[in-house]
Amino acid sequence: MPRIEPLSPPYSPQAEELLTSMMPASSPVPPLALFRVMGRNLSMAEAAHVMGKWMLRRRPKERDGLTVRDREIAILRTCGRCRCEYEWGVHVAFFAERVGISAAQANATARPELDGEAGWSGEDRQLLEAVDAMCGTGTIPAQVWEALAARWPPEDLLELTMLVGWYHAIAYTANAAQVPLEPWAARFPEP
């Protein structure tokens, strides 16, 4: 049972406008339960929408640096580490296959220890190690930072740290409010 019940239609005009803007224009699904929970505090939801939209803005091949695939690996691992099945499942369903994350790799992000059989590249492993470090200690060890800095400019390193922090906040909200899982979203793999 959710601790904070998601808004249900009919929505107020302000909530309707915000929920519509939070979903892709051609979305085959209604507004996400997480968005409808956040809609209980419209000013907070509006601010979260701005940040979330910025985090998800980039399209594949838009520029060199942190790719959409990198972004999704970081999000999935952050949600996996935070045990947030809700957000992990939504991102697996919407993005994983489209950005080249296999089912085995997606499932590996939800496990406490990374699966050596998931087919991660060396660069993927560096990214996953950085996410694990941030989730575990709040920082990135020097050796991992240096490897990432050889690959990405400072603006991408800043984006990565904010991305992991943002999805911690999303995971905390979804978990604490006990947002109901979307029926179409992926589920954590069996242990």
Image (cartoon, rainbow, N blue to C red):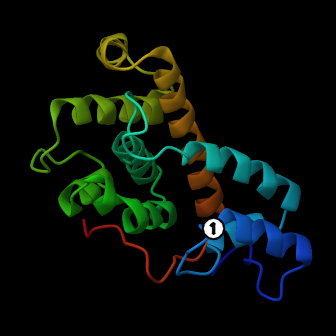
Quick one: SS at disc 1?
A: loop
The residue closer to the viewer here, 121 or 40, is: 121
Which residue in the rendered view is the most extreme toward the left? 117
The reply, left or right, for residue 46 in relation to residue 157 is right
Q: Residue at x 56, y 74 (%)?
A: 26
Q: Position of residue 140 (x, y in %)?
A: 42, 21
Q: In the rendered view of the protein, which quadrant contains the C terminus?
A: bottom left
Q: Position of residue 146 (x, y in %)?
A: 33, 11
Q: Residue at x 30, y 49 (%)?
A: 112
Q: Quadrant of residue 130?
A: top left
The reply, left or right, for residue 17 in relation to residue 102 is right
For badge 1, the amino acid type reads: Met
Residue 58 sits above or below residue 159 on the image: below
The reply, left or right, for residue 166 in relation to residue 90 is right
Q: Residue at x 39, y 60 (%)?
A: 95
Q: Quadrant of residue 67?
A: top left
Residue 13 sits above or below residue 49 on the image: below
**Residue located beneath label 1 in the image:** 23
